Amino acid sequence: MRDDDKGGGADRIAIRALHKRFGALEVLKGVDLTVARGEVVVVMGPSGSGKTTLIRCMNLLEEPDAGTVTVCGRTVECGGAMRRRERARQVRAIRHRTAMVFQQFNLFPHLTALGNVAEGPLSVRGMPREAARVLGLGLLDRVGLADKADEYPARLSGGQKQRVAIARALAMEPEVVLFDEPTSALDPELHAEVLAVMRELARDGMTMVVVTHEVQFAREAADRVVFMDGGVVLESGPPQEFLNHPVHPRAQAFLRLVAHDTPAPPPGGEPPARPARWEHAR
Ligand SMILES: Nc1ncnc2c1ncn2[C@@H]1O[C@H](COP(=O)(O)OP(=O)(O)OP(=O)(O)O)[C@@H](O)[C@H]1O
Ligand SMILES: [Mg+2]
């Protein structure tokens, strides 16, 4: 148990009254969200609703203007309420406990799959080279890529690259993993392999916040779905409840489009044509 786990409560993440603007654009307008230990929260919402900004604020990759961010018992009060050194200490602690998986993988092209996974343990955690290699190989095996350890990213498929990126995130032994649309840059046939790894991670009890429109994943792996629109959380609930019976008309309109956007092909038939992206539903 880390020292900050003592008295940290069951919540791994607690976001309170979070505000963020980019110039004149107010992107987050007072977001409250808690994520319990081991909980899997899926965040959905139209393009531009602030989903990426919200999860980037969770590990302070983005600097919120006001509100508080608490991760694993470490709190950052935003908007100048904290002494600079104390704030920097809390931010460092939060970053050590969170890992992020991006839409575009962000692998180092000059490193092999193993090199990518071992890089953090070597350079950030100061792990001896052999230990980092063993850890890296174990994690590549866990995401089904033991045989690709020596391949460079250019020779991996998108799905394989994203699985390396997940292994790389896990190599930092995070307590929370934040995913930003991890499958949306992939061809549909590659979604399943990435989602399978994520489902297993969820089953193993990892605390996860996943921005995704993968309805099936939300049904199977999420404890809760949070629907954002216009910089606020409009609705949240257990997946079966939210996905089957959304209350807010904007959530209903959004889900009608998303449900069509991730069609299950009928047996032997062509999948239905994709409708325009959901942002056009506004
Ligand atoms: N660094 C930035 N500078 C200026 N504006 C930004 C910045 N990052 C995001 N925005 C704006 O903030 C709004 C919310 O962006 P965000 O990326 O959080 O939305 P999103 O819900 O993740 O959308 P998408 O589904 O398209 O990924 C958008 O209008 C976007 O243009
Ligand atoms: Mg986004």
Image (tube, rainbow, N blue to C red):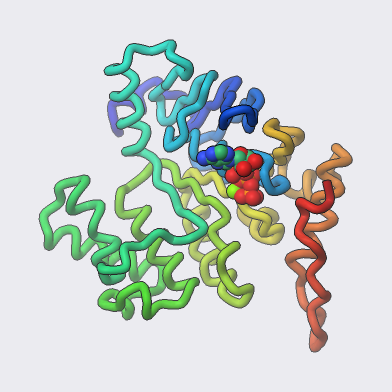
Judge whether 148 appears above or below 16 on screen: below
Give the farthest residue toward the front: 24
Q: At 80% across and 53% down in the image, what residue appears?
A: 280
Is 235 on the left-hand or right-hand side of 119?
right
Give x and y (percent) for residue 116: 29, 63
Q: At 15% across and 51% down in the image, what residue appears?
A: 127
Judge whether 21 appears above or below 117 on screen: above
In this orientation, does residue 169 appear?
A: yes
Give x and y (percent) for residue 264: 76, 72
Q: At 61% across and 54% down in the image, what residue appears?
A: 221
Judge whether 53 appears above or below 240 on screen: above
Is 160 on the left-hand or right-hand side of 32?
left
Q: At 53% across and 34% down in the image, what residue appears?
A: 36
| Front-most of residues 192 and 85 | 85
**Which quarter of the rendered picture does the N terminus lie within?**
top left
Is 61 on the left-hand or right-hand side of 221?
left
Give x and y (percent) for residue 101: 45, 53
In this orientation, does residue 42 appear?
A: no
